Image: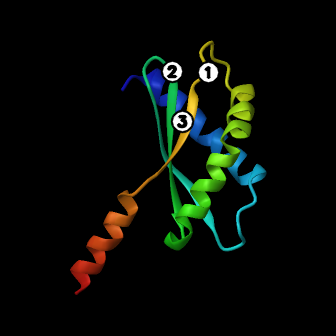
Amino acid sequence: MSERMRKINSVIKRESSKLITKNIDFKSNVFVTISRVDTTNDLRYTRIFVRVFPCADINYAMKTLEYEQSAIQKALHKKLHLRILPKISFIHDKTGDDVDELERLLQK
């Protein structure tokens, strides 16, 4: 990955994290964090990987993010200074779930 793409992903991660924190009201016990951001080389698409705590509220959080996707995308585009503005999509990051399951198995 080029240095330019790393910077773009970093800026998208930072700004989208701020937007999610300030603009979306999740239930009081639900926490959503952005684990990583992948943008295509042509800057057309960005996948934002999110982790949700507790795991029982994954469906609720993902539906809320999908509902707010266009508003987040518009606000994010105002912050970015790119000629081509990527279309964002939210994806549940399951790597943490795999690590938790492995840890439970190792403890047995």
25 to the left or right of 44: right
Give the x, y percent position of residue 68: 70, 46
Task: Determine whether label 2 and label 3 are within 8 Å by CB.
Answer: no
Q: Secondary structure at mark 2?
A: loop
Seen at 22% across and 79% down, the residue is 106
Q: Residue 37, labelled with which disc?
A: none
Q: Residue furthest top?
A: 83
What's the CA distance linking mark 1 and mark 2?
7 Å
88 to the left or right of 36: right
What's the CA distance linking mark 2 and mark 3?
14 Å
Examine the rendered structure and indicate whether residue 73 appears above or below residue 22: above
Give the x, y percent position of residue 102: 26, 71
Seen at 66% across and 41% down, the residue is 69
Given the image, on which type of amino acid does mark 2 rest? Leu
Given the image, on which type of amino acid does mark 1 rest? Leu
Of residues 66 and 19, the one drawn nearer to the viewer in this rendering: 66
> Along the polypeptide, which appears first: circle 1 or circle 3?
3
Examine the rendered structure and indicate whether residue 59 appears above or below residue 3: below
Q: Secondary structure at mark 3?
A: helix
**Which residue bears the numbered disc 3?**
10
Give the x, y percent position of residue 71: 74, 38
Of residues 24 and 6, the one drawn nearer to the viewer in this rendering: 24
Quarter of the figure with residue 99: bottom left
Task: Determine whether label 1 and label 2 are within 8 Å by CB.
Answer: yes
Which colour style is shown? rainbow
Q: Quadrant of the N terminus?
A: top left
Front tag of 2 and 3: 2
Q: Residue furthest bottom?
A: 108
**Which residue bears the numbered disc 1?**
85
Q: Secondary structure at mark 1?
A: loop
Examine the rendered structure and indicate whether residue 27 appears above or below residue 8: below
Q: Residue 43, labelled with which disc?
A: 2
